[in-house]
Amino acid sequence: MKRIVFLATIAVATLFYFSGCEKENNETKGPKVETLSAEKVSLCVVSLTGRISGLEGVALDFECGIEYSTDASFAEDKTTRQKADKKYSEDPYTVTVTNVTSRQKYYYRAYYISQLMIHYGTVKDFTVTWDTPQVVDLGLSVKWASFNVGASKPEEYGDYYAWGETETKTDYSWSTYKWCNGSYTTMTKYCNQSDYGKDGFTDTKTTLDPEDDVAQVKWGGGWRMPTEAEQNDLRSKCTWIWYSSGNTEFNGIAGYKVSSKKEGYTDRFIFLPAAGCLDASLSSVGSIGFYWSNSLSMVKSGSAYDFCFDSDGVYWGYSTRSHGYSVRPVCP
């Protein structure tokens, strides 16, 4: 396995359900406002539906949508109002809510505003639980997922992906790599050096397109692979504590507990298992972790930036794009 690294100094899981309970609001006379269903779109993305009826004779310049909040009383500082793209019709409308937090109950209600009058539907609630990754806010530039793509809890290894590919496979080599013609000098996408491109091919792409970002493809919503800079943020602004195999906190899985150093966030962490890597075969499981960024190496177009770690530390560098590594997504 070809890899260049630079040593860096270093010092929860979820099923979607909706509650059947509702709370009635007192409404003044006017159109009928109904709060309808909440539906899972993809991981941490929810669609909320409402309906306005009895519109005969009302003004055409009304607004309607959904309010959602972590507070049952809809306190202003904890409530978001999301306007629907609504025409003058009594058909149901839907708004999409992204990056909801795992294990957090949300309250939502349809609303209608016209001529300074506001009407609400009943209050319903939903909760994201254990088959969806928790959105972990470490106080960094992005939030991190609580587990890897292909996993269902923090200590599971998940799946392995070549850089820029969105499906697993059995052979992780240049002969099967999607973005070349069989070798590291025949790149057909993401290549800024003609020596690495097929027939001298180059393009200006240095970050994965959404359709080649496995986190975006598999999880949807605002999830994506981290940039090299965001990975560096995680390395430099968190405390990394190695857990060897046999630990009780993470079910005997070796890896790093990565905790925030930022004031107000020090009780928050993610766990990165030492999942090893796939090339000709699966190797280094339980001793090394390899995690892709979405950033092409500026040194060699046949490589992409990543970080890896073992019990001695965390390392920054770039690796051969055809290798199968883990992916830990981020979101805004």
Image: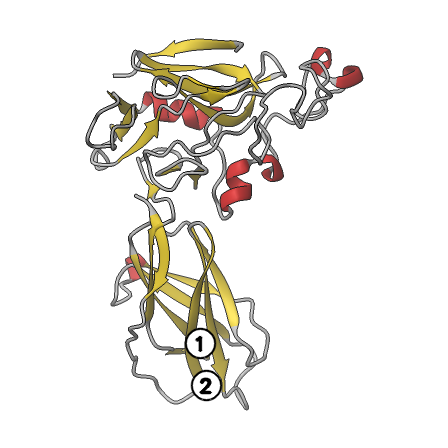
User: What is the crowding at mark 2: few (fewer than 14 residues within 10 Å), some, or many (at least 20)?
Assistant: some
- Residue 61's x, y, as percent? 55, 77
User: Type of residue at label 1?
Assistant: Tyr
Which type of secondary structure does the marked residue at label 1 adopt? strand
Q: Nearer the viewer, residue 215 or 253?
A: 253
Tally the marks. 2
Which is more N-terminal, label 1 or label 2?
2
- Residue 194's x, y, as percent? 73, 14
Disc assigned to residue 128: none
Residue at 59%, 30% (x, y): give it: 164
Q: Is residue 123 visible?
A: yes
Residue identified by numbered label 2? 31
Q: Where 32 sits versus 11, above or below? A: below
User: Type of residue at label 2?
Assistant: Pro
Q: In the rendered view, does 286 fall on the left or right side of 66?
A: left
- Residue 324's x, y, as percent? 52, 24
> Can you tell which quarter of the image residue 135 is in?
top left
Q: Are marks 2 and 1 in contact (CB under 8 Å)?
A: yes
Which type of secondary structure does the marked residue at label 2 adopt? loop
Q: Where 134 sits versus 272, above or below? A: below
- In space, the residues marked 2 and 1 are separated at their CA atoms by 8 Å
Quick one: quadrant of the C terminus? Answer: top left
Q: Nearer the viewer, residue 118 or 294?
A: 294
- Residue 296's x, y, as percent? 58, 22
Residue at 35%, 22% (x, y): give it: 235
Residue at 38%, 42% (x, y): give it: 152
Q: Is residue 116 visible?
A: no
Q: Where 79 sits versus 156, above or below? A: below
Q: Where 111 sits versus 246, above or below? A: below
Q: Nearer the viewer, residue 302 or 114?
A: 302
Residue identified by numbered label 1? 112
